[in-house]
Amino acid sequence: MIVLIMKKQILGLLSDFGTKDGYVAAMKGVIYEISGAITIVDVSHDIAKQDVRNGAFVLATAAPFFPDGTVFVCVVDPGVGTDRRGIVVEGKRHLYVGPDNGLLMLSAQHEGIKHVYEIKNRKYMSQEISATFHGRDIFAPVAAYLAVGTCLEEIGQEISDYIVLSQARATIEYRDISCEVLHVDGFGNIITNVILEDLKQIGLKSGDLLKIQIKTQVLNVGFLETYGKTQPGEFLALIGSTGFFEIAINQGNAAQKLDVSTGDTIAISRNSLSPYKKHA
């Protein structure tokens, strides 16, 4: 006997709505009204309020691990109700639905962009459209219709003048790196825009001691492979699972301790005086 395993259609939700109110549930209700066969996955609803860069970063770190064909509907939309467009981005692996403000593009660029469409066809939107909740009335229904097989060309017209966020890059001068905070995760780890290649340029290797300046605070921190290489409560630096340079505290909250938030600047330099030594 041949058993056919049907592939589930996955729809990922990301927003800055939080979970206190009914906004996320309303979007899910709209999606399920169109098809109860869709599997909805909450990527995150704790994006910093109206912080498009933060949303773009979180989406880009999660999307690569979803199956091909996943549809993402993303709402971090400070321009809702203005003349900003709604778009669908067709990547090489996934579809992305949301506002044309750069939110979708970091992830789509990483996998490769095939086409971008402006959402125009009123047929695939809710009957009544709120000026302040396009996530529920436009993006959720469009994403659901795409998930069940609606052709992209039916959604709207292809465009090429979509918005892409400028990506801040760390600057390197001799043995010094100037960077900024991209994200603070739920553990309080401080994730910067420094990648491993940047660290190699200043000759940094695992076990070296770093001098890190954040605001008026200066830390001497070991560059290590993982949190357990330090004692509980001790600072460390590492390349985290996102591929970016992080500053953390073993079993602690580094961002809270240092009063750091997204967008803050950090100076990193290699401390040539001595290697990191684990405390006994």
Image: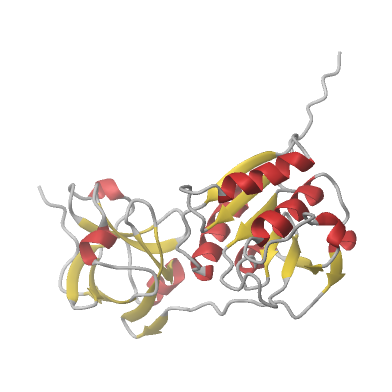
| Vertical arrangement, residue 269 with respect to residue 276, above or below | below
Residue, x 32% and y 56% (percent of image)? 188
- 52 lies left or right of 231: right
The residue located at (46%, 54%) in the rendering is: 46
Q: Nearer the viewer, residue 273 or 41?
A: 41
Which color scheme is applied?
secondary structure
Answer yes or no: is residue 66 visible. no
**Residue at 73 percent of width and 59 percent of height:** 138
Quadrant occupied by the N terminus? top right
Tell me if 151 is positioned left or right of 32 in this view. right
Residue 14: x and y in percent read 57, 54
Q: Quadrant of residue 266?
A: bottom left
Residue 129: image location, x then y, percent: 73, 60
Nearer the observer, 163 or 114: 163
At horizontal 72% and vertical 68% (from top left) the residue drawn is 86
Q: x and y percent of residue 142 in the render? A: 77, 55
Going by the image, does 128 lie left or right of 122?
A: left
Where's residue 157, x and y in %?
Answer: 86, 70
Q: Residue furthest top?
A: 1
* Rendered view: 77 above or below 1: below
Residue 86 appears in the picture as rendered: yes
Q: Is residue 151 left or right of residue 250?
A: right
